Amino acid sequence: DGGITQSPKYLFRKEGQNVTLSCEQNLNHDAMYWYRQDPGQGLRLIYYSQIVNDFQKGDIAEGYSVSREKKESFPLTVTSAQKNPTAFYLCASSTPPSRNHQPQHFGDGTRLSIL
Amino acid sequence: QKEVEQDPGPLSVPEGAIVSLNCTYSNSAFQYFMWYRQYSRKGPELLMYTYSSGNKEDGRFTAQVDKSSKYISLFIRDSQPSDSATYLCAMGDSSASKIIFGSGTRLSIRP
């Protein structure tokens, strides 16, 4: 079955630690996205990538980093510079907006908490 | 003012009722409109996707877009307890490089 797999489902971070969230898709989508969801707020865009080896900052990129070395994978690193990392992180993918726009499809998220 | 406004609820209705969920927006450039359903501790699941003004129906769900009023709606007929979830509206412009999401409406269907 085609889809988006995020791992781990739950993650705990210690002070000063960097953690990496995994996102893998087998939908053959070129574009991938990372969002952060906080209670009572809409999804906020952290980073997005429309093609391999290229990515752009979203609205709240500070304290986060990404890489896009493979089409299928778009890992997100939450660095120690992110002072309020506790949230639900969602990865999404789609065909690139520039080519016959299609809606984004989401994984089931990673819940990150501070120890 | 937020680009997309959505009443957070919670909204509680009896089973079998018709549910109306709504979003308003301020950016007239928005052309793509989506509704997602999100169960607790899960990712959003695409329910409806529309490009133009008017109605789109899929089973018990109808999406309505009124671009002149900058207002979109999702109607759920014959609501079921399994429809209890948070519903997110989302929209994008023609470049669609960025999608703006509403904050979500929490819906509860009482058996």
Image: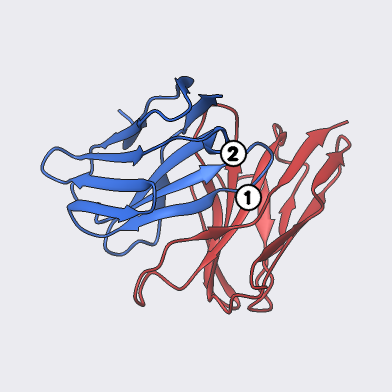
Q: Is residue A89 above or below residue A26?
A: above
Percent of width and height locating residue A55 = 55, 67
On-image quarter of the N terminus of chain A: bottom right
What amino acid does circle 2 point to? Answer: Gln
**Residue at x-position 36% and y-position 69%:** A101
Q: In the image, are marks 1 and 2 on the same chain?
A: yes
Element type where label 1 sits in the image: strand
**Residue at x-position 24% and y-position 56%:** B31
Percent of width and height locating residue B81 = 56, 32
Mark number for residue A37? 2
Q: Is residue A22 above or below residue B44?
A: below
> Residue A28 versus residue B10: which sits nearer the camera?
B10
What amino acid does circle 1 point to? Answer: Leu
- Provide the letter of the chain coloured blue: B
* Colour displayed for chain A in the image of the structure: red
Q: Earlier in the sequence, mark 1 or mark 2?
A: 2
